Amino acid sequence: VARRTKIPATKYPVERFTLENGLRVVLTPDRSAPVVGVAVVYDVGIRSEPEGRTGFAHLFEHLMFQGSANLEKLAHFRHVQGAGGTFNGSTHLDYTDYFEVLPAGALERALFLEADRMRGPRLTEENLLNQIDVVKEEIRVNVLNRPYGGFPWLKLPPVMFSTFPNAHDGYGSFGDLDSATVEDAQAFFDRYYAAGNATLAVAGDFDVAKATEMIRRHFGDVAARPAPELPDFDEPDLDAERRDSYTDRLAPLPGVAAGWRVPDPIGDFAAYLPYVVLAEVLTDGEASRLVDRLVQRDRAVTSIGGYVGFMGDEFQVRNPTALLLQAHMPPGGDADKVLRTVDEELERLVTDGLTAGELERTQARIATHLLRETDAVLGRALPMAVLELQRGNPGLLNELPKLVSEVTEEQIVTAAAALRPDNRATVEVLPGAAA
Amino acid sequence: MSATTLPDLIPDAKLKLPRQAERTLPGGLTVIAVRRPAVPLVELRLRVPFSRAALPRATLLSQSLFTGTGTMSSVDIAAELQAVGGGLSAGLDPDWLVVTGNALSSGLDRVLEILAAVLTDPAYPNAEVATERDRLIDHLQVAQSQPAHLARTALLKRMYGRHPYAVQTPEPEQVRAVRPGQLRTLHADRVRPDGAVLVLVGDINVDKAIDAAEKALGSWTGPAHQETMPPAPPLQAGPLHLVDRPGSVQSSLRMALPATTRTEPDYAALQLANLVFGGYFSSRWVENMREDKGYTYGPHTSIEHFLAGSALLVSAEVATEVTGPSLLETLYELGRIASLPPSEEELEQARRYALGTLRLGMSTQAGLAGLASMYASFGLRLDYLSDHSAALAVATREQVAEVAARYLAPSRAVTVVLGDAEKVEAPLAALTPVERGTA
């Protein structure tokens, strides 16, 4: 019988309040390093962009860096970096985030910068055309000019889902990007970028009372505008297997990805969490079931990974989402054989259960991954901003290692039993380049 | 009343180094322990000198290091590590074999025991090594279809000529010929404690952590394998080296320029000159190429240090149709920084960025572990952060201009472009002599 390692927990304090304009604020002070992280998250993502405007949520994220009421183009970047900080933003299926990490003495500057663009970006034709060019180069680097570009996060959703919000390409077609207008951008801002549709989180080395005062000073008079109603993007689960394949002209070796729908990550968290653990039982490290079987014993794949959420953001995604497996195969690899073996291993798990210590060691490793991310101020500010936005519960970040450690073998078996061939969506990459 | 003016910065407190301890064990392994108790974890980095080891064997050894010991299989090793929330992996650079890992801090003793078994009692089982060999070959084939890899391969050849740094990844066919017995021999010859550095950072008592390392790794012994890397040759500027990648929708533009090591007096000024030119988003080159022209998404420059030489690398993926204009802007910005001093404002902004990001880099266990291990590989310690901060704080505009003239002059650049030669050769040749070459 394996020794059980005690799973430790973090105790990051959490202060929450809401401004009169509806902006929800989370403060999580920690004075162990003289740095702060600031995150602003808006409740709009790829799933909300209109038909004919694929890629628009991401393009708009770029436009939020192009100047605002008191800031010329380039000023945002220069003010953050000239304070010794770094910045970025990213567009997800359900939200868009903007963030800075800075030396502690630059906190008020970051708050000023975020508040200024929350009042409205400077939307000009020139900046729009410039950023359409930049976004096209981003898509070329990450998708078009490299092997396995967009695999599987852009390639599996159209196989798995039937509705536009869930199925479409979130990076966008060049045609749709080219037809975007300044008016589209203004309408998108007006509809989705209301203070009441956003959260602000600050983590790190600051005094709560002083930070609260600064936040009121900078964000307090951002106009209140109605937040849009939260859309429901649910669609029926698959009633039969779906499959597709495509040729990647740059890929020298075949690949395959499969996905299964999972319970609602927010509405039914207790049923969802076992799938997060199952993904690791199946694929985390050389001792995991699928790596041991497919990589080491059968040599049917070169690598295999498993995770929940198309962007790997399992605690920051709404329904519908999926558990995904993705594998790269050696020359001549057989995707059908790989899928049959996955089915066989899932069946074995359901029939025989887990081996001694298998669940405990996987839970310990997940705890390390979770704790490790929270060591960085941004690893607290960003997830807490999203957890506040989606669940009203930023403190969940402290509880995740313990909740993961409480998942039972029975729950893992139940989750594994739900991953069947007849509710699976699969996409194969066929190699178009000579190996 | 909304705030319309930029709030002032509150000046940084004095740089504070974390508590640390160091001991060199009788076998020659140096152990450095650093305390940052923020989360109950420990980060581990081990560097073992590996200069001039035969590349195909060394690469496969790094891939196979955890395949088995006298008493544990690869699955046993992985499962035992997981049980304490741990994981270890290995990699290779031209100077070092590097082991990277982490675990719950309560598992430190166990991780060190497993690491010791891997170092002192390796098995390299035939079947597991054969699997890792096949995986590595597949991985190398995929790398050879990636433009970033092909461009770097071509640039290294042009930079280093006959020096060992010229080739940093093996050919698939070379790896295919490696046998498990050769890995056992290489391990016995080169995986030795003398000159190796182990860094432990996290929620630990630094003295007890070093005791634990001594207890676990005291049995790791054996004479050092003396290898010295010859100094890297000076860069030889020449025609732009154009590597054809038919159908490529982007061109990979790469340049190498000379640079100094971290300990030379010019280094702080060179780092600032690099920042003003292209080393961060708010640099001249990035603002020009991306935010003004829209030619590229993520252009960047950096100073790369190996034990036997340093270089400043310039890198951008640009649309095929603007490859010529992209080279034009790059040559212009290099010429400008090499010929004219930066403004005071540009310099102060770069200085604050350098000083601030240095603090950000020290703010996590993983960041500290990476810094401590990397500095130790050059014979430096974390107090270098204080010395370097002081040097950054006082570098003058004149020093930055003088260094830029010497190191960032476009006439000194080694340039490689990987792209659709049929489309980009003529526009490039309008600006500089071009020779066709291979990756």
Image (cartoon, rainbow, N blue to C red):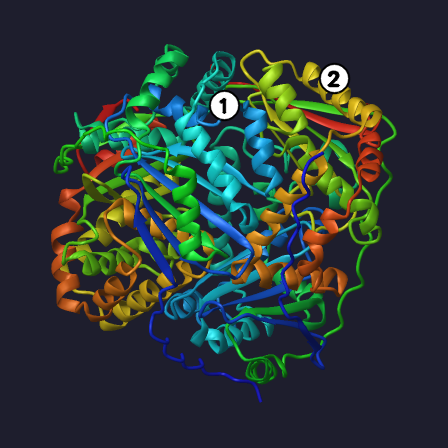
Q: Amino acid at mark 1?
A: Thr
Write down the quadrant of residue B325 in the picture. top left
Query: Badge 2 is on which residue?
Result: A340
Residue B108 rendering spot, x and y as whole percentages:
51, 46
Kindly identify the residue that appears in the image at 33 percent across and 32 percent down: B151
Residue A417 rendering spot, x and y as whole percentages:
84, 30
Q: Nearer the viewer, residue A93 or B26?
A: B26
Q: Nearer the viewer, residue B326 or B184?
A: B184
Protein chain holding label 2 = A
**Image: A24 above or below B198:** below
**Image: B426 above or below A203:** above
Q: Nearer the viewer, mark 2 or mark 1?
A: 1
Kindly identify the residue that appears in the image at 48 percent across and 23 percent down: B69
Point out the image quarter for the N terminus of chain B: bottom right
- Viewed as shown, does residue A186 lie left or right of B133? right
Q: Is there a contact, CB below 8 Å, between mark 2 and mark 1? A: no
Q: Amino acid at mark 2?
A: Arg
The secondary element bearing badge 1 is classed as loop
Residue B174 rendering spot, x and y as whole percentages:
34, 14
Query: Badge 1 is on which residue?
Result: B67
Q: Is residue A56 visible?
A: yes
How many numbered marks have been drawn onto this rendered protein structure? 2
- Gap between marks 2 and 1, in whole Å? 27 Å
Q: Nearer the viewer, residue A61 or A186?
A: A61
The secondary element bearing badge 2 is classed as helix
Write down the quadrant of residue A290 in the picture. top right
**Image: A44 above or below A103:** above
- Viewed as shown, does residue A238 lie left or right of B238? right
